[in-house]
Every structure is written in C-alpha cells, then in structure tokens.
C-alpha cells in the first residue's frame, strides 16, 4: 500500500525537544521530506534526506533515517511556540508523485 | 515565500458547477503538480504536468483535468463539483529531475 503513517498529536513544553516520527512504505524511496503547515497556509519545506544517509542536521532540526525499519524522525531542539504547526512527512519513490502522511499536530506549551 | 502563487485564495461553488484554479510556478521550474488536501488529511497527489503534458496521475476521476502553459503556469479544472471536493488545493513546482518541490499557499474550495 501507500500509507505513510504518523502519530496525530504531540505536545511539548517550550524549550524541550520534540521528536516526530513517521513510518513510510516504499523501500525504493530515494528522498524523504519533512514539511510544516501552519493554519490556513501551504506547505513549507523544512528539510529532506537522501536515502543513503542515516542522519542530517540543519540548525535546530535533526532528521534520522532507519531504512531497515522504514522509519524517519524529525527532532526539533529548543522547541518554540512558533514551531506549533502540523508536520508532514513525505516519501518520493522516484516516480512522479510524493506520498504524504496524515500529519502530526505539534502543540508547544509556554 | 516559495515564489509559487495560486489564485484565488478562497472559492465557494455549488454542487454540479465547474471550477478553475490557477498556479504560477517558481521561476525556472518546469514541472507542476497538483494536490488535494481534505480537512485533517495529508495532501493527495492529483496529477503532474511537464512540458504542457500530463505525465503522472493519482487516483482521481477524469472530471479533474489540467493544463500547463508555455510559461509553465498551470490550471486545475474540476467539473461536476461534488460536496467531497471541498478541500485545500495545493500546487507545487520543481525543476525536472530536482530533489525538492515547493508549494504555493493553496486555494480553499468550498462546495455547497
């Protein structure tokens, strides 16, 4: 199937780290992405990782990829209230379409 | 700001009507994809256009159709609107063979 799975909700306190998890389906996916969506807005590309990498760090963001388990995670260090949004993971199997998860709603408590 | 623009931002139609949504891709991007995002869901791929031709399609009926113009801008047309067509419609552009696509802000379509 083409189900990319994510947990629906995550709540953290300001200043803590957030970890958002994703399980994808296609082992041939060449790239995996994290997008952020704020209320009423489109999708903002946060970061992405090539399938031959295990980890990628970009400022406060760390992406971990476990190809064996088809598991992707996004860690946000020092989470701020402005990080409150819905986060989507997406896989790109190298065809023409990106397959998105249902999104994880992150709520940051002050 | 990604450089991808969409119009209109909001639209209200009634069942059975037809709608046209528009997208201008980021400069230099020749591939445009359209997605439907229902409330509380992730985006679902509708189709992709490259060089003015559809070259990939998701699980959407033929009443969803599109066009791409020589300047790479694109339209999404939906005929015989149904209530379930109410959603945020997102356009994304990229260069052919590029790693990443960039999304516009979307058009919110409400079908009554």
Image: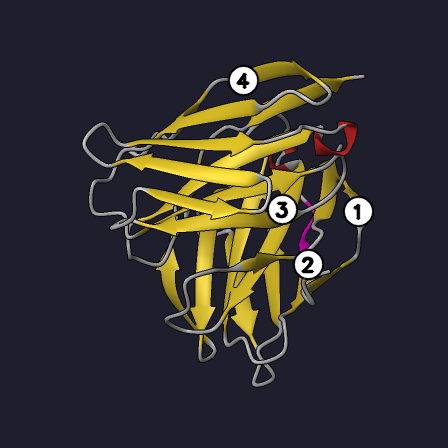
Which image quarter is the C terminus of chain A in?
A: top right
| Dominant secondary structure (helix, strand or loop) of the stretch shown in magenta | strand
**Marked residue chain, label 4:** A
What segment carries the magenta color? B17-21
Which badge, 4 or 3, comes first in the chain's sequence? Answer: 4
Frontmost residue, A90 versus B71 = A90
Please give the residue where the numbered disc 2 appears in the rendered image. B21
Q: Report, in whole angstroms, how far the alpha carbon at label 2 lies from the one at label 4.
A: 30 Å
**Marked residue chain, label 2:** B
Q: Nearer the viewer, mark 3 or mark 1?
A: 3
- Check contact, mark 2 vs mark 3: CB within 8 A: no
Q: Residue at x 61, y 36 (%)?
A: B82
Residue B33 x %, y %? 50, 60
Is the residue B55 above or below the residue B59 in the image? below
Q: Residue at x 64, y 20 (%)?
A: A16
Q: Is residue A26 left or right of residue A77?
A: left
Please give the residue where the numbered disc 3 appears in the rendered image. A43
Label 3 crowd bin: few (<14), some (14–19), many (20+), radius 10 Å: many
């Amino acid at each position: 199937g083409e189900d990319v799975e994510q947990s629906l909700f995550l709540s953290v306190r300001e200043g803590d780290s957030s970890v958002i998890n994703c399980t994808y389906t296609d082992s041939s996916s060449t790239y995996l992405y994290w997008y952020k969506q704020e209320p009423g807005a489109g999708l903002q590309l946060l970061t992405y990782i090539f399938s031959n990498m295990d980890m990628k760090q970009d400022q406060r963001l760390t992406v971990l990829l476990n190809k064996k388990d088809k598991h992707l995670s996004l860690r946000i260090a020092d989470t701020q209230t402005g990080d409150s949004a819905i986060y989507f993971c997406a896989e790109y199997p190298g065809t023409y379409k990106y397959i998105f998860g249902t999104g994880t709603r992150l709520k940051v408590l002050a | 700001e990604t450089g991808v623009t969409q119009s209109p931002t909001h639209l209200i139609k009634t069942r059975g009507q037809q709608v046209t949504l528009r997208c201008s891709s980021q400069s230099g991007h020749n591939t445009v994809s359209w997605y439907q995002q229902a409330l509380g869901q992730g985006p679902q791929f509708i189709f992709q256009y490259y060089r003015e031709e559809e070259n990939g399609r998701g699980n959407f009926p033929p009443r969803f159709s599109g066009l791409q113009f020589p300047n790479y801008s694109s339209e999404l047309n939906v005929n015989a609107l149904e209530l379930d067509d109410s959603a945020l419609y997102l356009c994304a552009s990229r260069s052919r063979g590029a790693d990443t696509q960039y999304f516009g802000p979307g058009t919110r379509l409400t079908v009554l």
